[in-house]
Image (spheres, grey):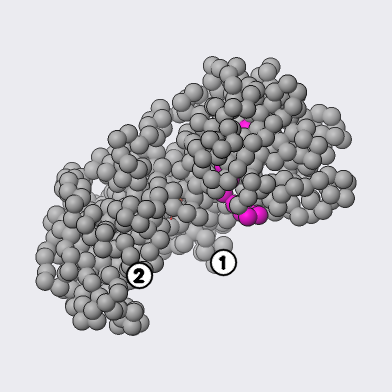
């Protein structure tokens, strides 16, 4: 997703902006740009590509001035070109803006502003903000009044920051994140704390429908009607500053490797919250769980846990689909929202629909300062530290760990959870990568891979296939074993690889039968199991653990396999093409 950064202070802005953008690279982007104010004028440099590439080609960080804005763009309106990259100056060049989100009425605004003589140079919706703000400034000659009129006329979801020709920064937010950093040497404003965490851990969380004006005399925050608003400065966790790869080649590998620890930290110090959630869930008439992507796959695992162990029915909902089937929720409903970022637009929309209909919201989330937490009655933190790789890895197992804890509380401790054993088992799997690396070499040139599991292992198969397609670009599909003969068997031949998730539990014999059916059609079988069998062309051993806990460990070798296959294919596992870490647009 687009990332925004702004700075006003005592130091040169451009190097600070470029470093901030680099730290937010994990959010995903296709182009980058910076604008600074110096000697009564605004200068813009931008280009297509990674921050480091564009910086070395266009010398973004050499722009002079102690005030500036920067942006990485993830294209929504208009193709990936330099002219569509941000910052966008207004047609007179007296101000420039960076924007994250979507302006729904940009076409009308553009037409109207063009008729008034304002020139547009890009295909983006964002440029409408620059010219609208310029128009309002031309009318009022006042930054505050021009901001009030602009936010009144914009429709959509947005966070934007503008730099004006007198060196003032102004920024507004509506349903997109924007956080102010208060440092000794100046002010920062960014989509993500990571954008400025190396300079300050003191922040102001600007609320929705608020704008801020920052200049050399200080900072003022207003609501969209222009009334002043007061906010406390809060401190954020310094842990966020850990977002460095260390000795690892990629964040993805680092994050996979952290799981023996993160599994133990999930939901740490949240006994009270977990007890409360258990009470809510017990008394709910209708119980739902929602998420997108990996978080939805975690929700599917929860369905099995709740029904098998707690004898409670919970309905998983794909967040982006909730809007098409309203009327799920009422005052006796509980919606558990699962999200790493807490900022996925689809998840927030599902939550808003549920809240409007009276449901109580419980969230399981990694970023405890996120919009999702603000919308929830209770939140439990994953505590797994920043996850930078676009592919969710450690956040998945942490989400599962919390859902396991809730299920276990609901059944009075019937699951006999032993997270130390899980942690040891993950260590064991991670202790030798060589076999997985050599299998990854074989996957390099294949075009289709299937992942098969039954019962609680089917959602893990879905998650495994998501990992494979996301970072290796191999077509991958998760299948419930029993469905094979209802269609997918037609696809099995000697060009196909099938991963069989087959721990030695109650699904073992049936899944083994599926493996034989596949083998008979010539496909290659890769078994993930604690029990060897001659049907497997390749066997990846996982430790034996109690039946309920297998999902927490069986995903690990497949995460590693996806990672090493990406390396073999020379794709970047941390930043897969076309994807963003935090999908804040619908
Ligand atoms: O931050 P969230 O958990 O709400 O994100 C949801 C999905 O966008 C995310 O899980 C996505 O599918 C991952 N890239 C999968 O690896």
Image check: 403 left or right of 127? Answer: left
- Name the image quarter holding residue 127: top right
43 relative to 305, above or below: above
Rendering coords of residue 238 (x, y %): 40, 27
Image check: 174 left or right of 362? Answer: right
Q: How far apart are marks 2 and 1 (CA)?
A: 32 Å
Rendering coords of residue 294 (x, y %): 39, 56
45 relative to 540, above or below: above
Q: Is mark 1 within 8 Å of ligand 1?
A: no
Residue 130 in view? yes
Q: Which quadrant: the C terminus?
A: bottom right
What's the residue at 64%, 42% (across, down)?
A: 86
Q: Mark 1 points at which residue?
A: 324
On residue 448, the disc is 2
Mark 1 secondary-structure assignment: helix
- Report if the CB atoms under discs 2 and 1 are less than 8 Å apart: no
Between disc 2 and disc 1, whose residue precedes? 1
Rendering coords of residue 386 (x, y %): 39, 39
On residue 568, the disc is none
Label 2 neighbourhood size at 10 Å, few (<14), some (14-19), many (20+)? some
What's the residue at 78%, 32% (across, down)?
A: 94
507 relative to 579, above or below: below
- Magenta-tinted stretch: 69-79
Image check: 400 left or right of 434? Answer: right
Q: Is residue 529 magenta?
A: no
Frontmost residue, 382 versus 1: 1
Rendering coords of residue 362 (x, y %): 44, 48
What's the residue at 54%, 16% (across, down)?
A: 184
């Amino acid at each position: 997703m687009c990332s925004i950064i702004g700075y006003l202070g005592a130091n040169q802005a451009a190097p600070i902006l470029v470093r901030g953008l680099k730290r937010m690279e994990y959010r995903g982007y296709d182009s980058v740009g910076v604008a600074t104010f110096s000697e009564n004028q605004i200068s813009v440099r931008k280009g297509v590509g990674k921050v480091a590439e564009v910086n070395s080609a266009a010398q973004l960080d050499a722009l002079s001035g102690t005030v500036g804005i920067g942006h990485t763009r993830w294209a929504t309106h208009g193709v990936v070109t330099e002219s569509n990259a941000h910052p966008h100056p207004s047609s007179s060049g007296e101000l420039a803006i960076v924007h994250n989100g979507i302006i729904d009425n940009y076409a009308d605004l553009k037409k109207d502003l063009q008729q008034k003589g304002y020139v547009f140079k890009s295909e983006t919706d964002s440029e409408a903000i620059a010219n609208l703000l310029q128009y309002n400034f031309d009318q009022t000659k006042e930054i505050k009044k021009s901001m009030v009129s602009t936010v009144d006329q914009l429709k959509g979801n947005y966070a934007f920051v503008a730099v004006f020709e007198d060196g003032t920064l102004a920024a507004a937010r509506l349903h997109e994140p924007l956080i102010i950093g208060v440092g000794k040497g100046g002010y920062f404003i960014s989509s993500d704390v990571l954008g400025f965490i190396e300079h300050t851990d003191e922040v102001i969380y600007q609320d929705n429908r608020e704008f801020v004006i920052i200049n050399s005399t200080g900072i003022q925050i207003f609501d969209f009607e222009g009334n002043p608003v007061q906010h406390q400065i809060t401190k954020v966790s310094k842990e966020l500053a850990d977002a460095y790869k260390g000795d690892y080649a990629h964040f993805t590998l680092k994050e996979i490797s952290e799981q023996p620890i993160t599994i133990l930290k999930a939901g740490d110090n949240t006994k009270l919250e977990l007890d409360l959630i258990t009470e809510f869930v017990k008394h709910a008439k209708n119980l739902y769980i929602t998420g997108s992507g990996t978080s939805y796959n975690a929700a599917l695992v929860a369905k099995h846990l709740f029904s098998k162990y707690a004898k409670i029915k919970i309905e998983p909902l794909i967040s982006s689909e909730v809007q098409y089937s309203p009327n799920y929720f009422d005052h006796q409903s509980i919606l558990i929202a699962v999200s790493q970022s807490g900022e996925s637009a689809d998840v927030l929309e599902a939550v808003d629909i549920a809240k409007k209909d009276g449901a109580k919201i419980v969230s399981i989330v990694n970023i405890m300062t996120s919009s999702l937490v603000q919308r929830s009655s209770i939140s439990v933190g994953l505590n797994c530290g920043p996850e930078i790789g676009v592919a969710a890895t450690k956040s998945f197992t942490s989400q599962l760990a919390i859902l396991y804890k809730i299920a276990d509380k609901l059944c009075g401790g019937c699951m006999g959870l032993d997270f130390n054993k899980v942690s040891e088992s993950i260590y064991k799997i991670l202790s030798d990568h060589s076999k997985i690396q050599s299998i990854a070499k074989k996957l390099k040139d294949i075009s289709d891979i299937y992942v098969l599991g039954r019962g609680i292992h089917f959602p893990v198969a879905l998650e495994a296939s998501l990992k494979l397609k996301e970072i290796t670009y191999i077509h991958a599909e998760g299948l419930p074993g029993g469905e094979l003969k209802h269609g997918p068997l037609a696809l099995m031949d000697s060009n196909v690889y099938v991963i069989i998730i087959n721990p030695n539990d109650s699904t073992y014999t049936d899944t083994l039968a599926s493996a034989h059916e596949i083998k008979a059609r010539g496909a290659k079988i890769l078994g993930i199991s604690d029990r060897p069998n001659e049907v497997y062309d390749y066997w990846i051993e996982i430790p034996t653990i109690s039946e309920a806990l297998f999902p927490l460990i069986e995903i690990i070798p497949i995460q590693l396999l996806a990672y090493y296959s990406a390396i073999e294919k020379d794709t970047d596992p941390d930043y897969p093409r076309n994807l963003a870490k935090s999908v804040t647009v619908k």
